[in-house]
Image (spheres, rainbow, N blue to C red):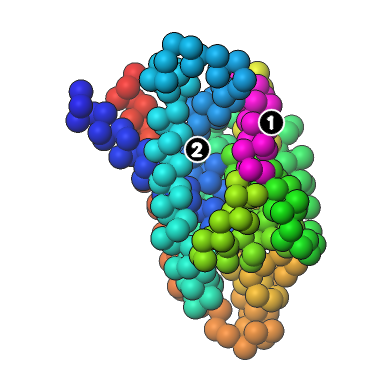
Amino acid sequence: MARRSWRRWAGIFLRGTAMGMAEVVPGVSGGTIAFITGIYRELLDTIAGLSIRSVARLRYGVVAFWRTTNLGFLAVLGAGMVTSILLFARVILELLDSMPLLVWAFFFGLIVGSCIDIARHSSPRNLMRVAPFGLAAGLLLSLSGAIALEPTPLWLFVGGMIAVSAWILPGVSGGYMLLLLGLYPSVIVAVADLEIDRLAMLALGCVAGLAAFARVLSFLMRRHYGPVMAALTGFMAGSLVKLWPWRTGASGAGDLPVMPWMYQHLSGHEPMLLGVMAAVLLGLGVVGLLVLARDAGTVARA
């Protein structure tokens, strides 16, 4: 029993590290990673279950409160995310700077595989009726230009609310929302340099946004699971535009996707077709392995 418990917490920590790395990259959602690794519903229901009413359970003791609210799960997952962000933020940014085509191609394959997996959780009827609306919303968001907000305490708080709402939704990247708001560079610098004052305001916004949005999303997932999955499938498909490796400018909000030969003409750089294709397949393969592991675990628990 102790060994099984240790393996469970280690698995949750590793999922947290994967979610943290995903959130560093604008366009990749930590919620997507949570979904394909099999912890999404537990994450959503745990967050949605936290309220003023749940605090009343403290009268039974801290240990009872901790267990009944599943805070151990959130603590271990959050520790994995924080560890990952602190360790890999600069590494991922350097990779995006040195080999952007391969990095974006890998995440493109990752989201394609995730999109296929999420589509499996809806019916063909829902996909035909609801997914086009999600697709339109995803395309609109992907092709929208960035605004430039000053990283003041107020805007960092608002940015945290918006980013965390995106973080918990598969297919929407919290990092990308910060990029659209013009806050992403400031937040990454704050993380890398441990600027506590800015990070504290961002964290407060995250807490406020999570408390509000998680309950709404949990309700929708319980009552309208199939249509929600169809909408997310369409939204993720639309968001692929943002992850297309070949773009008119530096990777970021506002640049547009182009064909490889046009990329070479505009940038003067090789399109690296074989490398990009290999990276896309690697991303697909990673999702496939994660889904197989998740489904195998589900069968084992049944």
Extreme residue toward the top, this view: 60
Q: Is residue 22 above or below residue 182?
A: above
- In the image: residue 72, left or right of residue 28: left
Badge 2 or badge 1: first in the primary sequence:
2
Q: According to the image, label 1 marks what residue?
A: 212
Q: Quadrant of the C terminus?
A: top left
Residue 125: name its quadrant.
Answer: top right
Residue type, numbered disc 1: Ala
Residue 272 is tagged as none
Q: Tag 2: Cα neighbours inside 10 Å, few (<14), some, or many (≥20)?
A: many
Rendered location of residue 159, percent (x, y): 70, 50
2 and 1 marks in contact (CB < 8 Å): no
Q: Is residue 61 above or below residue 220?
A: above
Task: Please name whichever residue, 6 or 30, is drawn nearer the observer in this view of the structure.
Answer: 6
| SS for dot 2 | helix
Q: Is residue 55 above or below residue 138?
A: above
Q: Residue at x 46, y 42 (%)?
A: 78
| SS for dot 1 | helix
Q: Of circles 2 and 1, which is in front?
A: 1
Q: Residue at x 69, y 84 (%)?
A: 266
Tell me, yes or no, if residue 290 can be seen here.
no
Q: According to the image, label 2 marks what residue?
A: 35
Rendered location of residue 69, percent (x, y): 48, 21
Q: Which residues are magenta?
A: 204-222
Tell me, yes or no, if residue 275 can be seen here.
yes
Q: Quadrant of the N terminus?
A: top left
Q: Is residue 13 above or below residue 218?
A: below
Task: Please name whichever residue, 33 or 192, is drawn nearer the observer in this view of the structure.
Answer: 192
Q: Residue at x 40, y 46 (%)?
A: 80
Task: Please name whichever residue, 47 or 44, is drawn nearer the observer in this view of the structure.
Answer: 47
